[in-house]
Image (cartoon, helix red, strand yellow):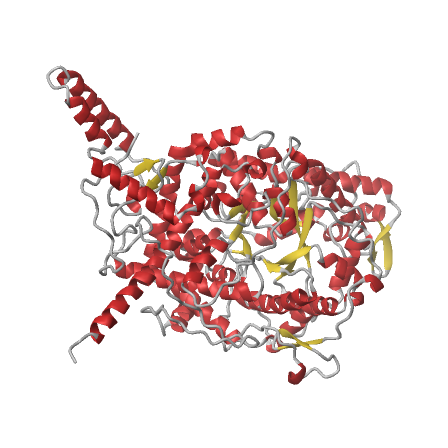
Amino acid sequence: MNRDSGSTTAKQSALAQNQPEKMSSNTNPGAATGHVAKPKPLSPFRKRGSLQYSASTVDPRGSRHLLTSQHSLPGIPVALKQTIDLRTSMDGKYKEIAEELFSRSIAESDMLLSAPYEFPEDSPIEQLEERRQRLERQISQDVKLEPDILLRAKQEFMKTDSATDLEYMKEQSQAFMDLYPKEMEREGENEYQRVSISGEEKCGVPFTDLLDAAKCVVKALFIREKYIGLSMQSFCRTTARYLEELSDRPLDMGIYEEIPETSVTADLDQTVHPPVSATHPYENQDPASMPSDVGYGCKMVDGVIHIYTNKDTMEKSTELELPYPDLQEYIADMNVMTALIINGPVKSFCYRRLQYLSSKFQMHILLNEMKELAAQKKVPHRDFYNIRKVDTHIHASSCMNQKHLLRFIKRAMKKYPGEIVHVEKGKGQTLMEVFETMNLTAFDLSVDTLDMHADRNTFHRFDKFNSKYNPIGESILREIFIKTDNHVEGKYFGHIIKEVMADLEESKYQNVELRLSIYGRSRDEWDKLAQWAVKHQVYSNNVRWLVQVPRLFDVYHTKKQLSNFQELLENIFLPLFEVSINPASHPELHLFLQHVVGFDSVDDESKPEHHCFNMDSPLPANWVEEQNPPYSYYLYYMYANMTVLNHLRRQRGFNTLVLRPHCGEAGPIHHLVSGFMLSENISHGLLLRKAPVLQYLYYLAQIGIAMSPLSNNSLFLSYHRNPLPEYLSRGLMVSLSTDDPLQFHFTKEPLMEEYSIAAQVWKLSSCDMCELARNSVLMSGFSHKVKSYWLGPHYIQEGQEGNDIRRTNVPDIRVAYRHETMCEELNLITQAIRTDELETITEEGSLCMGPM
């Protein structure tokens, strides 16, 4: 089976309407057929309007032309020369464009990206079949008269009618081997059918539009790389490698130490389990055995904590040389990003590329689905049930299902009926008395009585959803059973969390990243949380913690609990700096932080924002207004303090933290701009479906997106409209998560419930589900050593070299396809910039060669 190769656009890569598709599917990667004459050698200098693409024999990364992003961050004096011009027609207008965008309601934008799936009436498959039948009839009629007609008919159908075509196919295959040498090392079952596009303008837009869009995309990627690198979060290695070729400085790609490969024996199951410590991690609470005090001092200046070498004289002369993000530069970069996402030509380019990626994946599935399935069948023992899966977005206070919580409450009523659990007006109340005031007994309780499941009444009603956290509608029961800070010191909550952990350990292959809340109302919240975890021994190898900070300053300020926004920031971050400087000052917190992987920012994103974050915005110490600061304001100051904290903790040899906020669930698009610039991963990301530029950038940067379709179905977006299958087909780094099993799920294994419903509704294959599971491990906060056991010792390498199908059950074919497709996209935009630079050099050279 063969398809003709010819020029086409990204849109034409889908099923054609009137004629067979001009694509080739060959086991030789990158091959293109259908040319009669041997093509001319490609010149490194192209005329405007054409682009030298990855299919050429010239190595697209052979010549390095340097480009950098400007760094002007205090504490890192760097003067870098920008050698490639990234100026566009929008330069100088970013602030005006950004402010105009903020001033109107982006939530009602008509930037619709997704389109309904339609199958064309004139199917190319039917046309090919009709053509084949006509040729067979012609052959049967003429074969006696003209024996050569059979050969000519076959040549006409196969479109390989000369030695020139075969030579051309061979050259194209060699070009692909030069471009992807590692991908061609594996043979046999790793070979698969690839679809290639021939012709000069492969992206379907004029070169001038391509160049402008490429500059905007590269500029945005450099902005993200700057902030992610500064805060010691991880940046996609493949993207960093391409950006490095346009930069005159090496990019920190977060290379980990190499882990020696674990031997794969007949008992493969043992090799995928990391070794477990013989002692409990919370046992060593002796302050004398903890790291020493370095004697630094710290205080908050303009919303960001500064470190001083002498705690007695905290002034500029004793300030520690750590990088502090610059507010003015951040706002300028945010304006640039905001202007890019509404630029018409850039939107058109990104939309076309996303449509192309969707169509290409559909073609890949048509050609290679059986091979992927065969590769999975060859792997002994491993299947979807016994590969590692991480629930990358789940809240601790709702990590159990309704039936589990109901049984626990009934057990507590029978076991501790006389225990004082609440103090009302100075008088203690026992657990039995609390239920007696509600006229309830243990026998009366049921799942329906608890009334904690989200229903149709919670759709677009976040206030009603929050009230579902109260069992039987009583906030006092929420305080008793699912809070860490209460009269019984979180005893019941600790017990039920440990029961959930026991279920996870029994399942063995499911892991979770639970969110615990720090509100910022008082300075001792961190100590109370750590003491809860250590006292009740709330720990499991299957669990890591994230700390969520609700965006509720306006509520606390109205209640006179906080006087300004800086006070909230001090309550959140000062204890973390103190324990990093002197672990013995907060021994429980020091132990607890070893298992915390990052920060989350949570609240209802659909709440209106009346303030535009710019240089006129009040500093945190001066924010005394009744209204809440905007999303980007919260995120910037969380990021800035986390960045300084990470440098301090890295200096001391402690684990660092990442930023993984709720982002893009609802509300304005610019939330996703802040997430793109500052966050390692995000949760939800639904609004990317309305912003093609941001969606394409999230793809190129491979930013993790933890999606929860069942949660969205009850709150913001019905299940059949969820963009997860679209994101997955295009190659975005998406994973499935549960969010709130207490509100949305029914079974004992909510993560498996999430996978099973997605597989049924969207007809996901086993390969698709294993890819989602592998993504969840990659974007999780588990350590590099643990991931090397779960995914393989070389998992950080690019492409199929980093995949071990014996552990992930993801075929090398799928991983190779994802990597090659991404390299082609990155090559497209970087090649455009290099081609433009070559033209500029040629023009300058011709001017200099004029007559004396």
**Residue drawn 44% across the image and 54% down it:** 700
**Residue at the extreme right:** 418
Q: Is residue 484 left or right of residue 318?
A: right
Is 218 placed above or below 155 here?
below
Which corner quadrant of the image does residue 577 belong to?
A: bottom right
Is 70 placed above or below 796 here?
below
> Considering the image in quadrants, where does the C terminus appear?
bottom left
**Residue drawn 22% across the image and 75% down it:** 848
Residue 199: image location, x then y, percent: 25, 48
Residue 379: image location, x then y, percent: 55, 31
**Residue drawn 58% across the image and 63% down it:** 232
Residue 133: image location, x then y, percent: 22, 22
**Residue drawn 37% across the image and 54% down it:** 827
> Considering the image in quadrants, where does the N terminus appear?
top left
Q: Nearer the viewer, residue 584 or 448?
A: 584
Residue 11 visible? The answer is yes
Which corner quadrant of the image does residue 344 belong to?
A: bottom left
Q: Nearer the viewer, residue 690 or 683?
A: 683
Q: Is residue 666 left or right of residue 422?
A: left
Residue 714 visible? The answer is no
Which corner quadrant of the image does residue 307 belong to?
A: bottom right
Is 351 placed above or below 320 here?
above
Count the labels in the image: 0
Residue 112: image location, x then y, percent: 38, 51
**Residue at the extreme left:** 145
**Residue at the extreme top:** 144
Q: Is residue 161 left or right of residue 525?
A: left
